[in-house]
Image (spheres, helix red, strand yellow):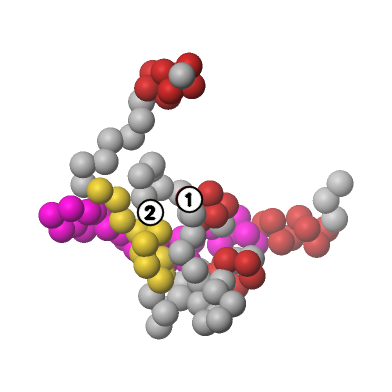
Amino acid sequence: MATAAQKENQAKLEEYIDKIHYSDRYSDDIFEYRHVILPKPLFKMIPKQYFNDETGTLRLLAEQEWRGIGITQSLGWEHYEVHAPEPHVLLFRRRKDYVAPTHSGLKAMRRK
C-alpha cells in the first residue's frame, strides 16, 4: 500500500507532467523537429542515471526513458540533442518521411 508521502509525490508528478510544454513542429528538408520544455520541478525528479557523470548534463534519452518521465508524443521521435544552457529543454526530431508501423504490419513482424 502506498504511504501518504508516496501518494503526495505521485500527485506532484502528475501535476508536473500536465505542465510539460510541447512546441509546434518545425522542419528542414529531412527532419521535423520540436522541443519539449519540462517544468523545472519535474526536471529535478529525473533519475540521476539519466545524467552524464562527467558533465552533469542530461544525456540523450532512449524512447522508453523519455516516455518514462512523462513525455508523450507520437511514434518516431528521437531525443537528439541536449541544450546545456537550458537543460530542461529537450530537443526531438523525426524524419519527415516517417511512417508509423501499422497494426497489421506489427502482426506480420511477430509471425516471422
Q: Residue sitting at 83 percent across and 58 percent down?
A: 4
Give how far across and how far down residue 110 sits, in percent.
48, 21
Residue range of the region highlighted in magenta in the rendering: 12-38
Question: Label 2: few (<14), some or many (≥20) within 10 Å?
Answer: some
In this view, which residue lies farthest toward the left?
29
Q: Quadrant of residue 37?
A: bottom left
Magenta span includes 111: no
Give how far across and how far down residue 7 sits, in percent.
76, 55
Please state which of residues 78 and 4 is positioned toward the viewer in this rendering. 78
Callouts 2 and 1 close, C-beta under 8 Å:
yes
Please state which of residues 56 and 90 is positioned toward the viewer in this rendering. 56
**Which amino acid is tagged 2?**
Glu
Asked which secondary structure carries label 1, the reply is: helix
Q: Earlier in the sequence, mark 2 or mark 1?
A: 1
Dot 2 corresponds to which residue? 78
| Left or right relative to 44: residue 7 | right
